[in-house]
């Protein structure tokens, strides 16, 4: 028989304040084994009073996230059901920065902490929080390199478990939900090649080349020469190894280099797949102008980027994603991205929205992580694995709800040969 007395009812009341709702949409189990909340709802287990202290000192998304990353809160069942329930109510359903509790609500939270014996100092953030990567002038070369290292230099073995053999860390293109992740990623890489109009002998720049998957595909299938640039030392090391194993060292060069420092123009085409989210709103105009300058007249740029769809763009530096996943990352709206590219001198050729495709991709990554959980923990840390589980599951729900999207914007530098009359040339 489940116990209904104990810490859980008071804890449920505190969580309701944080969520901005009257009743929590979860079944809550406290550290003493007591439970509260609707029967049959997704289960959330609170292992430690320390979790409540985190919520008291950082009420909102950050406190809850820290408790989850530290292992003090657990969603032991369907992660999508648990996070979906959280994101469907109150403050978690709002777009923009998380609204802080009122002074009266903070008093109620403090009283709950006293009654539950949870009073104490503010626990130190989990070590996975990006403290070093958020120091210095925002979007300076040094700070951008630290931010990229925080996210990508967490172990190639860890990423291989999540991404699978394709080692592609961006939205795949699915013919159907049953396509399979590897086939969907190959379809995406080939779609980018066709949109760029790649032909043998062309010179291509891959901005944010990751582990070299696009560069290898383009060189092997289309006979082009590729320069791939990344700020991640671990990515570059594995990308070079993969290029050598593919026998393509004469066609693919992988550099640890900021795109702003690329000087050996011109290029016939540029791919930027899942990179421009790191550029930032203040720098996006300079990004567009710089890539325009690197292209020869008539050359095409394919910009593949996540977009913010939920009304006016808002960024909360104290939310989970900037603190733990993408320091200094910013999602722009599609209108902002297209405006920046046009402002940089580009002509828009095509825009394709891929929002449902990213939900499928993220669910496949979460499945890979959960099936290989012990290996992922050994390849990184328990906290790092929980960060990726939380961010990927929550992101999938955001794409399914339509608050976030992902778009491929194909543009060209004016001049040179006219592009095809119809987009069927690259479909």
Image (spheres, helix red, strand yellow):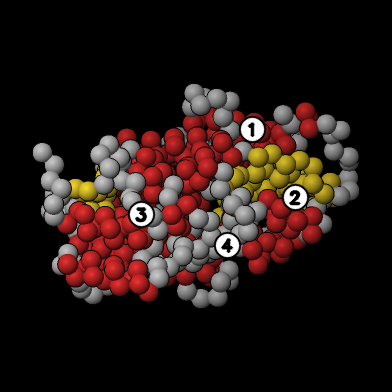
Q: Earlier in the sequence, mark 3 or mark 2?
A: 3
Which residue in the protein does label 3 denote? Answer: 22
Q: Earlier in the sequence, mark 3 or mark 1?
A: 3
- For marks 4 and 3, give the CA distance: 26 Å
Which residue in the protein does label 2 denote? Answer: 267
Q: Nearer the viewer, residue 356 or 102?
A: 102
Q: Earlier in the sequence, mark 2 or mark 1?
A: 1
Q: Earlier in the sequence, mark 4 or mark 3?
A: 3
For label 1, the crowd category at 10 Å Cα-Cα, with few meaning under 14, some 14 to 19 and many 20 or more, is some
Residue 114: x %, y % from top left: 19, 70
Which residue in the protein does label 1 denote? Answer: 190
Residue 291: x %, y % from top left: 73, 56
- For marks 4 and 1, give the CA distance: 34 Å
| Residue lying at 15% horizontally and 48% vertically, measured from the top left | 4
For label 3, the crowd category at 10 Å Cα-Cα, with few meaning under 14, some 14 to 19 and many 20 or more, is few
Q: Nearer the viewer, residue 235 or 250?
A: 235
* Callout 4–callout 3 Cβ contact below 8 Å: no
- For marks 3 and 2, give the CA distance: 58 Å
* Callout 2–callout 1 Cβ contact below 8 Å: no
- For marks 3 and 1, give the CA distance: 50 Å
For label 2, the crowd category at 10 Å Cα-Cα, with few meaning under 14, some 14 to 19 and many 20 or more, is many
Q: Secondary structure at mark 2?
A: strand
- For marks 2 and 4, give the CA distance: 35 Å
Q: Earlier in the sequence, mark 4 or mark 1?
A: 1
For label 4, the crowd category at 10 Å Cα-Cα, with few meaning under 14, some 14 to 19 and many 20 or more, is some
Q: Is residue 295 left or right of residue 129?
A: right
| Residue lying at 58% horizontally and 68% vertically, measured from the top left | 139
């Amino acid at each position: 028989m489940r116990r209904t007395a104990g810490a859980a009812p008071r804890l449920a009341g505190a969580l309701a304040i944080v969520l901005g709702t009257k009743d929590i949409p979860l079944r809550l189990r406290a550290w003493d084994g007591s439970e509260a909340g609707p029967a049959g709802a997704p289960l959330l287990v609170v292992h430690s009073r320390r979790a409540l202290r985190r919520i008291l000192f950082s009420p909102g998304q950050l406190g809850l996230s820290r408790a989850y990353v530290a292992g003090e809160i657990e969603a032991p069942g369907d992660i999508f059901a648990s996070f979906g329930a959280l994101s469907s109510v109150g403050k978690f359903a709002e777009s923009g920065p998380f609204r802080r509790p009122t002074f009266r609500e903070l008093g109620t939270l403090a009283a709950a902490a006293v009654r539950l014996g949870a009073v104490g100092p503010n626990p130190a953030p989990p070590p996975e929080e990006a403290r070093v990567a958020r120091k210095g002038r925002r979007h300076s070369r040094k700070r951008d390199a630290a931010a990229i290292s925080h996210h990508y230099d967490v172990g190639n073995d860890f990423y291989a478990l999540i991404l699978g053999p394709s080692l592609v860390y961006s939205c795949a293109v699915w013919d159907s939900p049953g396509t399979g992740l590897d086939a969907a990623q190959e379809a995406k890489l080939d779609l980018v090649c066709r949109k760029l109009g790649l032909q043998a002998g062309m010179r291509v720049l891959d901005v944010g080349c990751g582990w070299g998957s696009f560069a290898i595909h383009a060189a092997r299938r289309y006979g082009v020469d590729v320069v791939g640039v990344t700020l991640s030392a671990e990515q570059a090391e594995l990308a070079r190894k993969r290029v050598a194993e593919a026998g393509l060292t004469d066609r693919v060069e992988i550099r640890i280099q900021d795109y702003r420092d690329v000087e050996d123009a011109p290029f016939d085409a540029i791919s930027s797949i899942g990179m421009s989210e790191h550029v930032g709103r203040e720098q996006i105009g300079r990004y567009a102008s710089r890539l325009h300058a690197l292209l020869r007249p008539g050359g095409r740029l394919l910009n593949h980027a996540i977009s913010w769809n939920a009304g006016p763009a808002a960024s909360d530096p104290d939310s989970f994603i900037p603190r733990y996943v993408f320091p200094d990352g910013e999602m722009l709206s599609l209108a902002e991205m297209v405006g920046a590219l046009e402002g940089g001198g580009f002509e828009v050729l095509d825009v394709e929205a891929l929002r449902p495709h990213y939900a499928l991709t993220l669910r496949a990554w979460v499945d890979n992580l959960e099936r290989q959980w012990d290996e992922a923990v050994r390849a990184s840390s328990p906290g790092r694995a929980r960060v990726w589980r939380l961010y990927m599951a929550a992101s999938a729900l955001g794409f399914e709800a339509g608050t976030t999207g992902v778009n491929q914007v194909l543009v060209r530098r004016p001049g040179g040969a006219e592009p095809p009359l119809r987009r069927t040339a690259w479909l």
